[in-house]
Amino acid sequence: MTRDTSSRSPRKKYILLVDDHPLMRRGQADLLNREPDLCVCGEAATAAEAMAAIRELGPDLVVLDMTLPDKDGIEVIKDIRALHPNLPVLAMSMMEETIYAPRVLRAGGRGYVMKSEGSAEQLATAIRTVLGGQVALSPRMAAKVLSSMVGGATALGAGPEDKLSDRELEVLRLCGQGWSTEEVAQRLHLSAKTVEVHRANIKEKLGLQTTPQFQRFAIQWVIAQAHSGGR
């Protein structure tokens, strides 16, 4: 965790950047600090550092990467909402918006920006949108939200993975990336038995009869996300 020691102007809004890639944070900080109304007050590389920085720095908004080494981004949003209910969170990730943005919103996040599509201007605009009390989404995702609200013709995050809980989706993603049950358990701070239960639930919900079928589905799903801008 680092802190900007420059003097604060009362006109600016203070942003905490949470991302485990130092170059990504530095690039975002350099760009946002050029904005007349925004200032990066601190950076964090893990969920634990982020929670400590929020307590210490009191930012106006958190820009949160969805893939952190110590905790899933959805869970971090829930933690922030529980402890700091008035602090808005803007998610920024390489993971596909149509799948993860609805989960971010349900967890209490106020917007979603894909790294692969988000320029400096788009990020600053999204931050201002959230600070203004609105939800920041791409036009494509906003259209899906409106369609879902008017008649329910389009389901958010449509697809077989939409049947899964946030934790189950994270297990699916890690398994598809080739991690073993023990490695998934370690990364998610769960027991191996709990991971196996999640895998069984995923198989049942998606109609996968065998472990090889599950593994093929998980790998193919991860590859599909990568081709569409996912991570």
Image (cartoon, rainbow, N blue to C red):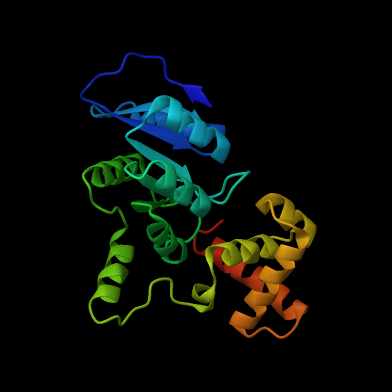
- The quarter holding residue 203 reads bottom right
Give the vertical position of 76 relative to 231 (above or below).
above
- The quarter holding residue 197 reads bottom right
Closer to the camera, 226 or 97? 97
Numbered label tally: 0
Residue 65 image position (x, y, % from top left): 49, 45
Quadrant in which the C terminus is drawn: bottom right
Give the vertical position of 220 relative to 122 (above or below).
below
Give the vertical position of 78 relative to 173 (above or below).
above
- Asked whether, in this view, residue 88 is left or right of residue 175, the answer is left
- Asked whether, in this view, residue 25 is left or right of residue 184, the answer is left
Residue 42 image position (x, y, % from top left): 44, 27
Q: Residue at x 56, y 51 (%)?
A: 72
Residue 162 image position (x, y, % from top left): 49, 74
Residue projecting furthest to the front: 83
Q: Residue at x 32, y 58 (%)?
A: 138
| Residue 115 visible (yes or no) | no
Closer to the camera, 1 or 55? 55
Give the vertical position of 56 relative to 159 (above or below).
above
Q: Residue at x 54, y 72 (%)?
A: 164
Q: Residue at x 70, y 64 (%)?
A: 175
| Residue 158 visible (yes or no) | yes
Residue 8 image position (x, y, % from top left): 30, 18
